[in-house]
Amino acid sequence: MPLTRRDVLRNLSLGASGAAISPAMLPFMEQLRAHADGDVSRIPKRVVFVVKSSGLTPTALVPGALAKEHVKKGDVKKSGDNYDLPEKLVPAEKLVNASLKGRALPKTLKALEPFKDQMAIVQGLSGKMCKGGHSSWYGALGCYRTGGEHDTGQVKWATIDGELALHMPAIFPHVGLTLGGKVMDSGVPIKNSVVYPGISAIGKDRPLPFQGSPMLAYKDLFGIVASGKGAKADVELKSTLLDFMVDDIKRLDKKIGGAEKEKLGHYLEAFESLRERGRRLKGVEAQVRKAAPVVNDKYTSQAETDRLEAHFDLAAASLISGLTNVVTLRVDTLSIIYKGLGITRGVHGIGHGETAGSMTPGEARDRIRRFHVEQIARLAGKLKRIPEGDGTMLDNTLIVYMSDAAEKHHASCIQWPFVLVGGLGDELKTRGQYLQYPHYGRKGHHTIANLYTSLLHAVGKKRDTFGQMDLNLDKEMQKGPLTELAG
């Protein structure tokens, strides 16, 4: 009797050569088995937080057709540390729930057009239980007040990414990737080491580390594929670190078919890409390089844009492989200067209304936001090409784009914008919608804690509240998930 694909997958504990498969293949193998069995409950859910500094401009997220009603001209004034944006969001008296279908996305979100039916723009949530200013530090993801202008403050409990990491365990419970250190770090803004940016924690007084160097992150994440003598990360890289995994994938490819084979192909593509980049780094293509202009590889480049692209590639590969289910990308700090985007002023200065060469502060913010969104779209595209269950990997992965400083530099935290892409299976869905909740204190208003409670409900960790409550708001409006995102 011929073997079914389920039988093949269940028995694939050894490669074709008889050698045990790579440890890093095990999570992916479990995904393939769940896929073949049709067991949706075993297909993992994943969350990626993309956290920027200096605020996420609310008016820049309003689709053009809705702007006439929901955007008004602001009073631009610069006084001390306060800088008002030229446009402001019109406070909503009742919930705005508008479809994105047939509506053009604002210019800095254009890269997400292919995912418009799987995204939600969420406005009007407040976070006044957090501190405003340069950063809300752990409060942005933890919903509590802590820290000062330069001080991260005390970790009171796990932030939402830490909570999710505890509930959705993997080889790496949490992967943190960053450009710099603390939001107001002095000195060199680009970091090439493990840092603690002060935004994520896995428990009381337990901040989560982030890797600043794409190269070191590469070694940390994928160094587990080899074992035995000489298996240290630097040695593994010189001997083409990912050969083991790529060979395993190719052996498996001969044994399975159907949707699993397609998923395996995308998995192979992700790791071959990482392997080829590693080969370039160790000089395999030295002869080609001699005849070509010298181009710094993104994994060793000091350009902010290159490093961010490398970090997003690492995030994708980590998720696809099953090495982790929770990633937080700290995409900049106030000290970062996006020279790769032609911006000559640091994020801090732009937040204070300083021009950046020929660009106004608004134009510079738009260009930075557009670049972030393009990286999110690249990540979403990789996940959407991978079949999983009855849909794709993107259906089970939520990407959250947000700021650690609410709506602007020196934020009031009265409104805290989010862009959501993907979903968490049948438990949380983004349906191509623009949501703007009633203004602070109005009936139907909610806080960022309600969104985080929604994420916890979606992964099976049901609770009424998350973090501290805003004592100036009715307790009931701060309880439970956002029903508009429920599956």
Image: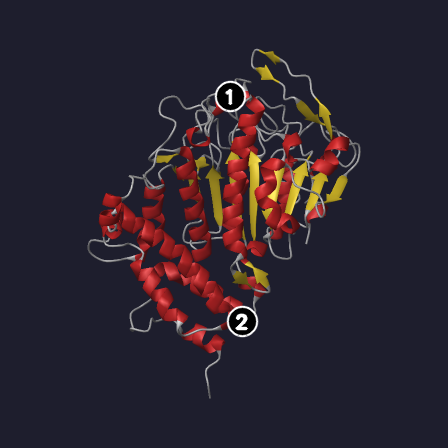
The amino acid type of the residue labelled 1 equals: Ser
Residue 289: in sight, yes or no?
yes
Q: Report x, y in % for residue 95.
A: 77, 38
Q: Secondary structure at mark 2?
A: helix
Q: Residue at x 56, y 26 (%)?
A: 363
Residue 169 is labelled as none
Looking at the image, residue 101 lies above or below residue 343:
below
Residue 110 position by quadrant: top right
Residue 37 is labelled as 2
Residue 409: in sight, yes or no?
no
Q: Which residue is mark 1?
A: 358
Q: Is residue 482 left or right of residue 442?
A: left
| Residues packed near mark 2 inside 10 Å, few (<14), some (14 to 19) or many (20 plus) | some
Q: Report x, y in % for residue 456.
A: 60, 48
Is the C terminus in the top left, top right, bottom left or bottom right quadrant? bottom right
Looking at the image, residue 262 lies above or below residue 323:
below
Residue 142 position by quadrant: top right
The amino acid type of the residue labelled 2 equals: Asp
**Which mark sits nearer the N-terminus, 2 or 1?**
2
Q: Report x, y in % for residue 480.
A: 69, 44
